[in-house]
Image (cartoon, grey):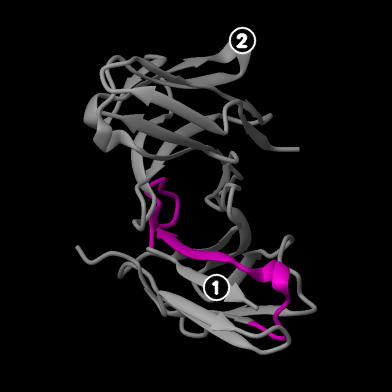
Amino acid sequence: EAGVAQSPRYKIIEKRQSVAFWCNPISGHATLYWYQQILGQGPKLLIQFQNNGVVDDSQLPKDRFSAERLKGVDSTLKIQPAKLEDSAVYLCASKPKGHYGYTFGSGTRLTVV
Amino acid sequence: AQSVSQHNHHVILSEAASLELGCNYSYGGTVNLFWYVQYPGQHLQLLLKYFSGDPLVKGIKGFEAEFIKSKFSFNLRKPSVQWSDTAEYFCAVNAGSGGYNKLIFGAGTRLAVHP
């Protein structure tokens, strides 16, 4: 079974620039998550999708972050404009609906300079 | 509010030493608990999980964890660590209901095992 694919693996941008991350979950997984993992901290949930609908985006900084999952499969997370404090690893995870088998991608390491 | 607390941020051990990493949670619903490991440069991998039943859970690579409901704890243990156990370990609680579950993570414990 293929894992959760994320790209790019690494990204370096200047503050105030925009950036986008892509995630392809495991086929058939209805639920998709984006987590932010700042160095020295545990992953923090940014947004949760069930198919193409948002279930929880309470911790998403909506003034600069946006995410979509238009066809209920792939998802993109965008930051515009980026700030220094956005430097982190952005993790995508997916699981089947009603199941507890979370699968994580390798993440995208973002450095904002 | 739902939260997970990991007591030790950094642990340094010699090979063959015993390991215990603390985890306490705060969650009012049905508790599902997890330990994940993240090796350098790799993705999060599930070590073990507790849903119900025997509070002593055995996972992969010789790890085990004990759920103590009265202490709201789910500590991770390994009798004898190896250099290859060097990694970051995260405790997590599954929160939510109605199928809309999510993982809430602790801050993690970075383990370094010296040969």
Q: Residue at x 61, y 10 (%)?
A: B70
The residue that disc 1 covers is A110
Q: Residue furthest right?
A: A63
Nearest the camera: B100 or A36?
A36
Residue A4 among those drawn in magenta: no
Nearest the camera: A13 or A46?
A13
Q: Residue furthest front?
A: B115
Percent x, y of residue A23: 43, 75
Q: State which quarter of the image contains the N terminus of chain A.
A: bottom left
Disc 2 to disc 1, C-alpha distance = 41 Å
Mark carried by residue B70: 2
Q: Is residue B14 left or right of residue A76?
A: left
Q: Residue furthest left?
A: A1
Of all chains, the one bearing label 2 is B
Q: Is residue A98 left or right of residue A43?
A: left
Type of amino acid under label 1: Leu
Span shown in magenta: A79-105
Q: Secondary structure at mark 2?
A: helix
Residue A72 in sight from this viewpoint:
no
